[in-house]
Image (spheres, rainbow, N blue to C red):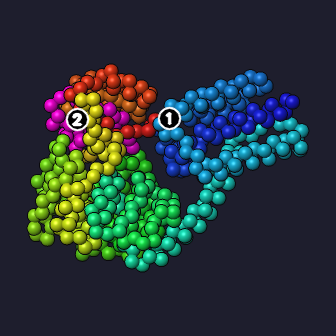
Amino acid sequence: METMVTSITHLCFILGLSYYFITAMQWYSYRLERILFHYNRYDWHVFYFLVPLAGYYLLDGFVLSFFVALFLLSLFIWQKKMDKKLVWTARVKRFFLFLVLATLFQDLLCMVLVTSCLKLGVIILLMAAQIASMLYEKMLFLSFKKEAQKKLMANSALKVVAITASYGKTSIKNFLAQILSTKLNVYKTPRSVNTIGGIIKDINESLPEQCDVYIVEAGARARGDIDEIAQLVNPHIAVVGCIGEQHIEYFKTLENIRNTKMELLHSLRLEKAFVHESATIKGTETIISFGSELSDIEANLNGLSFSMMLDGVKEHFTCKLLGAFNAINIAAAIHVARTLGLSIEEIRSAVSHLEGVEHRLQKIEAGGKLIIDDSFNGNLEGMLSSYDLVAQHQGRKVIITPGIVESTEEANKTLAKKIDDIFDLVIITGKINVTILHDNIQKAQKIIISDKTKLQETLSEQTFAGDVILFSNDAPTFL
């Protein structure tokens, strides 16, 4: 009886500990080094991994069973508060299958060979499940990658456009798809899918066989990430958008970020590349620097207008999109559209009908309040631009923000000072930048919310008709 209770307690504990582990792994793209060296909530590592692990080895009998029950209860409460919960993908299910098999095998060894074990292993089981999962996923990855390459090669007429940037790549992708769709059969990677694994899955499962243009978004957290994508899809046209300090904690220097983004040009069939001037490259017949051709940019709460010099002619464009920074994203899309054969008039018409990207300066009116949802905008330049936009509003100005995630302290100080100049009420969410924002915002009223479930209540109590409310960046709870 005692052996059975011990085995059940052990299984429950290892499942709970592994639930926390695999949740963190999923948040950080299943990269172990990221949850070890780039995690933003190390206090959770202590509370939900190290303390439970110590308790498991220090306690015995009924006290241990009670301790494990408390641990599982605290883990349940923790995950209920998460806005980004564990997604039970096939990969996660396979991990737990490997874990349960390893645990049962160990328990069987203890009963048969040793009669009983004073303490059943935990870390060794977690390592065994992780190693088995990594090996299996690697084999699947190579198989799926080969299948994706074969599918791409089968359509010789397909033009591939790949887009990367420190910020704005999803917007460029969506704007380009809308413009090209007026004349061509276009398919783009969905949502913010921009990793090698996500792109391979998208090609195999969703890329239509009859398609003129495939637009791929390429993201990176390490050197070589974009090179791997470039070698997979071999784009005919590459776009490198604005380069900045996004993900600086991974790359350490701006030069490393630039070099990683430029890996997109490693395509074996590159015909044309449009690279934003922030990359400071020397233009060639194939590689064209863009950005300086823009002028007369005007942005307000009704829309955006700008001019571009194209072949020596100043062309004017207007659209309903908010934000001056969108001019550069649209400009990139215009360059690609011209390369693929659309006329200026066709492009101008398509630009005038562009729809905004969800959660990127999305305007909503509710209860007499003007709500601007810019929760997917997480870079300094874009956020500052959105604040200038809000400054045009005559009424009270409210902002909800966690600051800039995965950037420098200096960038967040700059952000805080701009917020202090424009907004009347600042609601700070998350924990990562609370101190920096609080110390550098002096004039505006401040409210700090660590539990995002209380945000709705706070907004209903603190905002009124006539207010403009800006959701600026949206860090998940684990940040």
**Residue 377 location (% of width, % of height):** 32, 45
The residue pinned by badge 2 equals 418
**Residue 422 location (% of width, % of height):** 20, 32
Q: Residue at x 48, y 77 (%)?
A: 154
Q: Residue at x 39, y 74 (%)?
A: 158
User: Mark 2 or mark 1, which has the lower sequence index?
Assistant: 1
Residue 188: quarter of image: bottom left
Q: Residues within 10 Å of mark 1 (few under 14, many from 20)?
A: some
Q: Quadrant of the C terminus?
A: top left
Q: Residue at x 65, y 36 (%)?
A: 16
Q: State yes or no: residue 406 in magenta.
A: yes
Left or right of 286? Residue 162 is right
**Residue 53 location (% of width, % of height):** 66, 33
Q: As shown in the figure, which amino acid type bears the numbered disc 2?
A: Lys
Residue 349: quarter of image: bottom left
Left or right of 250? Residue 137 is right
Q: Residue at x 16, y 66 (%)?
A: 345
What is the tally of numbered marks visible in this picture? 2
Q: Quadrant of the N terminus?
A: top right
Q: Which region shows up in magenta?
A: 385-414
Residue 136: quarter of image: bottom right
Circle 1: element type: loop
Residue 452 in sight here: yes
Q: State yes or no: residue 55 in magenta.
A: no
Left or right of 339? Residue 393 is left
Give the number of the disc on residue 82.
1
Circle 2: element type: helix
Mark 2 and mark 1 in contact? Answer it, CB < 8 Å: no
Look at discs 2 and 1 and give the one toward the viewer.
Answer: 1
Q: As shown in the figure, which amino acid type bears the numbered disc 1?
A: Met
Residue 243 in sight here: no
Between 16 and 48, the residue placed more toward the observer is 16
